[in-house]
Image: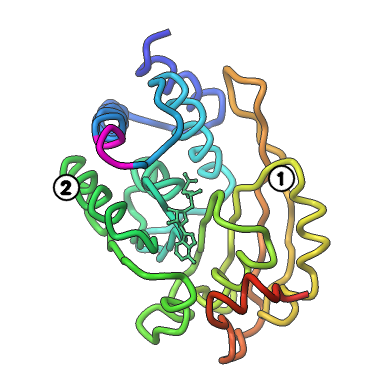
Amino acid sequence: MENRALLRDCCEQMGVSLGEKETEQFMTYLSLLLEWNEKMNLTAITEPREVVLKHFADCLSLVPCVEWRDGMRVIDVGTGAGFPGIPVKIACPEIELTLLDSLQKRIGFLQEVGSQLGLEGVHYVHSRAEDGGQNPQYREGFDLCVSRAVANLSVLAEYCLPFIKVGGRLAALKGPDAAAEAEQAKGALKKLGGRLVEIKDVAIPHTDLSHKLVFIEKIAPTPKKYPRNAGKIKKEPLS
Ligand SMILES: C[S@@+](CC[C@H](N)C(=O)[O-])C[C@H]1O[C@@H](n2cnc3c(N)ncnc32)[C@H](O)[C@@H]1O
C-alpha cells in the first residue's frame, strides 16, 4: 500500500480523521525526516512505510484518547524529531504546542518542519526538562504534557509533572512494562502531585505492535524542590 493510503487507513482504523491537507503535511514531514536524517541522527527508522507505522500511526493513537480543546496548551517533553507532538498537532491544529528538547540541532529540524508544514501555534524550546520545569515561564503552564521514549516513569514524572497545571494530565506513550513502571513510580507520583488515572492498551494497525498509554492527573501543585538537577534525578530516582 502506498504511504498516503497506508496512513489514511491507519487513521480510519484508529478513529482519527485526517483530511487531504493533513495527509500532505505528513508526507512533507516524512520527506524532511528522511532527508535530514542523512545529515543528523533523528531516527533509527529509515523505511518510509516503517516511519508511517512506527512514528506517525504510533503517535496518532493518542488522538482519540484525549479531549482536545481550542487553545489547549500542550508540551512534548523530549520530543526528538517531533514525536508525538507534531503528528498530534497536524491532526489537532487547534492546540498550542510547545516542543522541548535538550538537543539544539533537533530543535533546528523541528523549526524547519513547522515552517514547511505551515504550522501555527508551535513554540520551540531548547532546554533540559529539569531546567524548563523550574522556569516560571513554563512551570505549571500546560493542560497536557505528552512524552514518548524519554525515561522510565519515575524519572519522566519528575521531568513532566512540574510543567502541568493542577487538573491537567500527563500522557506517556510506553512499552509493555507500563504497569510495572507505574507501580514503581507510585511514590514519585505522590511526591510530585500526580495520580495514576489509567493505562490504555493501543494496537497499531498493519503491525503486530501495541503500546500502552499511561495517563496521570495532576492533583496538587508540585513542590518547588522538584525537578531536582539532572544528576540527582537519574542517580536517585524518586520512590
Ligand atoms: C529516544 S529520544 C525520543 C524522541 C521522541 N520523543 C520519540 O519518541 O521519537 C529521547 C529524546 O529526549 C531528549 N531528552 C532526553 N533527556 C532530556 C531532558 N532531560 N530534557 C529534555 N530532553 C531530553 C533527547 O535529546 C532525545 O531527543
**Residue plotted at (18% across, 45% down):** 118
> Where does the image place residue 85, in percent across and percent down from the top left?
41, 50
As rendered, which of 18 and 210 lies closer to the eye? 210
Q: Is residue 92 magenta?
A: no
As rendered, which of 174 and 150 lies closer to the eye? 150
The segment highlighted magenta reads 36-40
Number of numbered discs visible in the structure rendering: 2
- Residue 132: assigned label: none
Q: Quadrant of the C terminus?
A: bottom right
Furthest residue in direction top, as rendered: 1
Identity, as a three-letter code, of the amino acid under mark 1: Lys
Task: Report whether residue 153 is seen.
Answer: yes
Identity, as a three-letter code, of the amino acid under mark 2: Ser
Q: Is residue 128 above or below residue 201?
A: below
Look at mark 1 in the image and give the residue it sits on: 200
Q: Is residue 40 above or below residue 57?
A: below
Q: How many residues crowd mark 2 within 10 Å: few (<14), some (14–19), many (20+)?
A: few
Look at mark 2 in the image and give the residue it sits on: 115
Q: Is residue 16 left or right of residue 110?
A: right
**Residue plotted at (37% across, 17% down):** 3
